[in-house]
Every structure is written in C-alpha cells, then in structure tokens.
Amino acid sequence: MFGKVLRKEERYTLSIPRQDYRAALRLRRMLQDVNKILYYRIQGQLLRVLPEMVCVKQVHGSFLIGKYPATVQQYRSYCTDIGRPMPSPPPWGWRSDHPMVQVSSEEARAYTAWLSEISGETYVLPTLKIWKRTAAKGGDSNDINKIAWWGENARNMTQPVGKKEPNGWGIYDMQGNVWEWVDGSVDDSKVQAAGGSWNSHFEQC
C-alpha cells in the first residue's frame, strides 16, 4: 500500500445467508479499494467458497495455485448453486473438510469454470509442468509420513486437508490424500492426475 499509513484498522462483520454468497462476492469486489477490511460470515463460518491461493514465484513469472485441494464443502457450494446433486459418496461418506473425490477431469474443469464465473477471476486446472514445478520445492521434512496421507498412514480413507506439513511454497497435500487433476502436458497428453492419494504406494506419491 502506498501513501498515508493507517494507524487504525477498522473491521466489520457482515452476516449473509449461505444462498447469498454471490452477493457477498460482488460486494467484496466493490470494496477492494476501500480502507476497511470486510469479513463475511455465512451461518457462523468464514466464507469458504473460493479456494485460498498461494503465489509461486518463478524466474519467468509467477502464478497462483490452490493452497489446499478443493474440499467437499467447496464442491458442495458449486453443486448447490447450479442445482445438481453431489456425486455418489465414497465409503466413508462426505466430510466437509476432506478433499473432494469421485469427480472426473471434465467435472473438475466445469468446477473451475464456475469459480471463474462467480469470482470474476480466471481459474483453470494446472498443467502438469506447473504442478511438477510447484511440487518439486520440498518443505522442511523428507519423511513422507510428515507431508502426506498415503497407503501406510491414511487409515483407508481421505483425511482433512492441511493437517500434514506444507511444501516449500506453503502448499498442502500435493503428495497423497487425493489425486489431483492436471491439464495434460506437452510430452504426455495422457497424463491427467498427479501426486498419489490416500491408498497410493510410495512411488505414486
């Protein structure tokens, strides 16, 4: 921020029903240039429709990528908004803070298109090249059990996002927990998912 330093930060809380989150997003965009921080609460919780993003800085430019895998709650907001049922649940059922599963690559692309529509920003699946570049920066640990839910520790199901250590960019669950859809690659157009999941072996993660 440039110019005068604000000595006092004003905070306001506005409660908006869940079905009106589009209005909340529009209002937030309108207030982006105002020196106030507006928090939105929907049924007592912070608005979590849009994914939290992390900036990955590279020599040839930067990009934003999701800090966590898309959650069940985020995908449920999408299904509710467009009037479609949720996919068939996994054996452990739908748990709001777990990563979304049972979604095809086409459905994942439709979800990112919906995010773009409601936010006014552009969301796409990462390319395999970008995914690999992001995943390559490890964190403080080389112990897979500290960074990933996989076949040896996930107890035969997905786990809540963000509970393991992040990688060097501050991104969680890039290895394990759930396969992540990517937008193909130049050298292998058949590759569509990366990172391994809750039931993967070490090499897949």
Image (tube, rainbow, N blue to C red):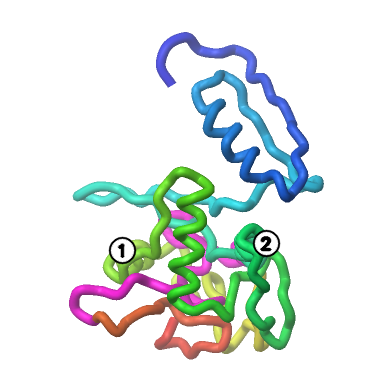
Residue in the image at 53% along x and 61% along y: 68
| Residue nearest the observer in this picture, 34 or 4 | 34
- In the displayed structure image, the side of residue 36 where residue 19 appears, left or right: right
SS type, badge 1? helix
Q: Position of residue 52 (x, y in %)?
A: 53, 51
Q: Which quarter of the rendering shows the C terminus?
A: bottom left
Q: Is residue 48 above or below residue 75?
A: above
The residue that mark 1 highlights is 130
Determine the main secondary structure of the stretch shown in magenta.
Answer: loop
Q: Which residues are magenta?
A: 161-188
Residue in the image at 59% along x and 40% along y: 25
| Residue nearest the observer in this picture, 59 or 72 | 72
Which picture quadrant has residue 15? top right
Q: Is residue 176 above or below residue 58?
A: below
Residue in the image at 65% along x and 64% along y: 83
SS type, badge 2? helix
| Residue nearest the observer in this picture, 24 or 182 | 24
Which picture quadrant has residue 91? bottom right
Checking the image for residue 80, the label placed there is 2
- In the displayed structure image, the side of residue 64 where residue 97 appears, left or right: right
Q: Amino acid at mark 2?
A: Thr
